[in-house]
Image (cartoon, grey):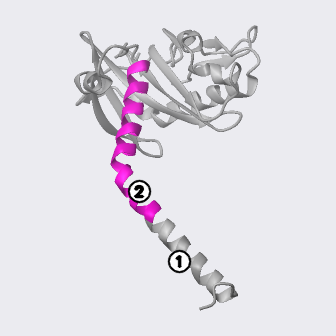
Amino acid sequence: MKTDSNVYTIVYSTVLVVIVAVLLAVVSQVLKPRQEANARLDVQKQILTALNVDFTNADPAAMYDELVKEETIQGANGELPLYVATIGEETKYVLRLKGQGLWGGIWGYMALNDDLNTIYGINFGHESETPGLGGEIVTKDFRSRFFGKKIKNAEGAVVSVAVLKQGKIAEGREQVDAWAGATITSTGVDEMLSKSLNEYVEFLTAKEETNYGTVAEN
């Protein structure tokens, strides 16, 4: 076959593409277990952060296995993860949060006291929010604004916590100040909290004996 012919070019290119595709597939399969392990470790770190656990000088995976038990419960729209943690002698319940920010997805984990009402800790993550603005939702400065807030109103209904510009008032629910200059991302956090807690509303308002212990309405 002539090397300067069109047929040769097409055949050569096709063979090269197939070889590269096979190599990429092999590499992907080889690295998949490590990638999955790294992804799981990242989630474990996020949950520990929501639980206010300092793992700086420790093995986070080992700490997670010691403190956290993973469960699955039925939510408003299907199965949901529930993380039950023992901190000291107290039980904490960690809920998964998912939403949309200004430039991409945002997510987080909320830890509640055993009253299923008071926020013990919270953690946020994002794909591509603006550094110094929306990206600041990951900082402790922002996260700590939620500590101790209630997600239920006086009647025991789940109403979430409002994230509003300073000076604005949320009727019938507790609130935190939005991050200055990050209105859209802060609104995304507000909507994420409401939507995600609504997914867990049956669990949060349950008043029955479960395998988690006695869950009492506040």
In the rendered image, the vertical position of residue 51 relative to residue 148, given as above or below: below
Question: How many angstroms separate mark 2 from mark 1 (CA)?
Answer: 18 Å
**Residue 5 on image: x %, y %:** 68, 88
Q: Which residue of the protein is positioned furthest toward the bottom in this rendering? A: 1
| Residue at 55%, 28% in the rendered image | 125
Q: Nearer the viewer, residue 113 or 63?
A: 63
**SS at mark 2 in the image:** helix
Q: Residue at x 62, y 15 (%)?
A: 172
Q: Which residue is mark 1?
A: 15
Which residues are drawn in magenta?
23-49
Q: Which residue is mark 2?
A: 27
Membership of 161 in magenta stretch = no
- The part of the image, by quadrant, that contains residue 202 is top left
Q: Amino acid at mark 2?
A: Val
Whether the magenta-drawn stretch holds residue 45 is answered as yes
In this image, 61 relative to 169: left or right? left
